[in-house]
Amino acid sequence: MNPLQLLGGTLIALGTALSVLAAWGVLNFPSALSRMHAATKSASLGLALIGIGAGIAAGSWGLVGIGVLVTTFLFITAPISGHLVGRATYLAGRVTDLQHDDLADCVPSPLRIEAADTARKSPLRFIALVAVWVLLWRDLSIGVLLGGVLVALITEFAGRVPQRTYTFSASGLSLFLVRYIWLVVQSNLRVAWEVATPSNEQISEGIVAVPLETRSTAVALLVANAISYTPGTLTIELTGDPLVLYVHVLHFESVEQVRADVAKLERLAMRALPEFTGV
Amino acid sequence: MAGFITIIQVILAGAGMLALVRAIQGPTLADRIVAVDLVLLLLAGGVAAHAARSGSELLVPVLVVVALVAFASTVLVARFIEWRDGP
């Protein structure tokens, strides 16, 4: 048992514990949306820890790379699945027993993504594509690298990806990332707490409309994703023009408190993507 | 290490059973798809654990495929629910 195996084994054990929490929550939480909370928050971090832990324990950097790749993908997609399934459940009329419901009188208006002026070539995206290719092959030989460059070139020139350039602020983004990771940890502890204290009467759900300050859909999407990893909240709907986020809250106390929490995150997101802060 | 991984895989399988119970019970389609999605992720966890024991990377692409399929299927079913029960 060398130190790497010990570290990897610890991560695997932690990830397994989270996976069990997710399964327990999905089985025992009282309503469809509360079950979604457990699945979204715990399952993705669980698999992430198992994947990265397995790579470390096996001493294989290729496997760690795949773990990081899958983790990134999961953290982008899990809130989207939660949002889509949650909204579908709501529209199907399966969400009952809400203490507060702002979504009932919501006027649906589609999100308008800022139009791209031209299909821009982005060097950052090019490098990211090559990196994903190399990670998938788990091999940094000259052949794989050339193949990756070829595929990325074809994607860049053949694909008409509507591209808008965003200005990132490195310090803002890293601050947001630190906050994000802290939220993910907190929300998993919260799910663990909910599972450990199964008193269903305490769960009083609500859906709160949160008007966003920003005009940028990129900031709104960043906030919508992060909200799904905030303890006890899940993004259900996002309408454009003006941007309003509809958040499902597991323990509804007051509208103001939810709005204050979202506003705090929004300010961080606006600092990470500063181009659009000044309306 | 091998014994530890076997225990991990048994626990993951047990968690999968819990999720499957929810998938069978329902009561809504949304519950079922969330549960099946979770079963897929637990399966991917088992595959990753296997890679840690054997040191073989043969099954690792399965991780990527499972993550992709789990997402695509969830989106598909969500769209289906909206189409079936929507206005």
Image: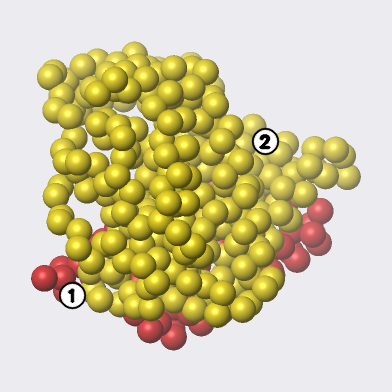
Chain colours: A yellow, B red
Q: Is residue A203 above or below residue A68?
A: below
Residue A6 seen in the figure: yes
Q: Residue at x 65, y 63 (%)?
A: A192
A226 vs A181, left or right, is left
- SS for tag 2? loop
Residue A260 in percent (x, y) is at 45, 44
Q: Which residue is mark 1?
A: B85
Callout 1: chain: B
- SS for tag 1? helix
Callout 2: chain: A
Residue B66 seen in the figure: no
Identify the amino acid type marked 2.
Answer: Ser
Q: Residue at x 37, y 45 (%)?
A: A224
A216 vs A139, left or right, is left
Q: Residues within 10 Å of mark 2 (few under 14, many from 20)?
A: some
Residue A209 in percent (x, y) is at 31, 54
Q: Residue at x 60, y 62 (%)?
A: A191
